[in-house]
Image: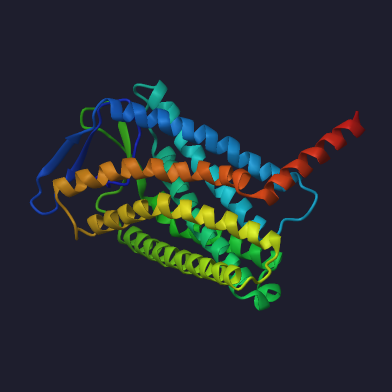
Amino acid sequence: MTLSPMSIPANFSHDAVDEYHNNTDSILCHFELSSWVPFVTGVYILIISVLGIILNVFVLVVFWLHKKACTVAEIYLSNLAAADLFLMSVPSVLAVTAATVDDWQFTDTLCKVLMFFPRMNADCSIYILALVSFDRYVALVHPLTDGRMRRPLYAKLACVMVWGVCFLLNVPTFIYSEATRDPEGNFTTCVLKDPIPTMYLVFKGVNEFCCIVLIAVISFCTVNIIHTLRNRIKNRLNTQKKEQKATTLVLVVLLVFMICWVPMQVVRILDLLSLLKILNGCHFLKNLHLCYFIFTSLVLSNSVLNPILYVIVGKTFQTKVKESFTQMSTTLSISQ
């Protein structure tokens, strides 16, 4: 059975030996992670997961409690918080397992869930951020079309489509994931069936291509937004203060996203090439696996940074927090 570099270790507490078949010369590749790497990774993921869950729940509660309906930007940001929340939930389970259990074996069903949901919600984050950047692009660069295109109903429909597309593109991951036991018999690992099914490769290829296009869209929109704002400042044109604040928030969120996600996207593309047997070799697979460990932590950090940025940069969100808690306090006082 061939182990994909993107598979999820079921137990980080052991000195796991990941095995890859070199498709060029059929030599079995072995390498070990230092004993401190799994422990440090597990603790870090646990801390990040707990913070991410608390902060993203806080963002969703504020949007839900506020008496006014969400704007188009807030609809996108609330869906982004939901995707981040779901993304953080699974790593927290893995981290607790890694830190507390020496020999916990995964079932096929659990492996399917653990490989499906993080990937689906990670993809949703990219798609929704593309919607956020396009929304800011229309509002700032093409304000005359603002009223026709930026409607809450359209935003809700776009988010429903994003969740549906991300779900469908990751169905093969759910179908073809399974649990396998390490040859030494001391831990289980979640892997893809061997040989890798053609349907999985097709869907993964489509998914990675879409993510590349979305990153290009995000970059295009961001560059044009910055250019437009500079021209307005240079020409001393008036801009709505609310739009300026929202744009500042989105630009910071997008910048953080690019730093956290682009390295992982490169790794995902390299993983696809390795599955297609275009790139192979023990040295390449070892480095790919190590990069996956590092950049996964970076991706998870993004899900914590987003809600923090809402509070630090988003003055509108700060106002909404104050109004929501004031409203809640008033309601509790009346009920008593």
> Residue 265's x, y, as percent?
36, 55
Residue at the image position 17 percent from the left and 53 percent from the top: 280
Rendered position, 325 above or below 26: above
Q: Is residue 124 visible?
A: no
Front in this rendered view, residue 328 or 190: 328
* Left or right: where 234 falls relative to 65: left
Residue at the image position 73 percent from the left and 46 percent from the top: 319
The quarter holding residue 190 reads top left
> Residue 210's x, y, as percent?
42, 65
The quarter holding residue 112 reads top left
Front in this rendered view, residue 264 or 323: 323
> Residue 24's x, y, as percent?
10, 54
Outermost residue to the bottom: 144
Front in this rendered view, residue 170 or 58: 58
Q: Quadrant of the N terminus?
A: top left
Image mark count: 0
Q: Is residue 307 visible?
A: yes
Residue at the image position 47 percent from the left and 38 percent from the top: 90
Residue at the image position 25 percent from the left and 32 percent from the top: 182
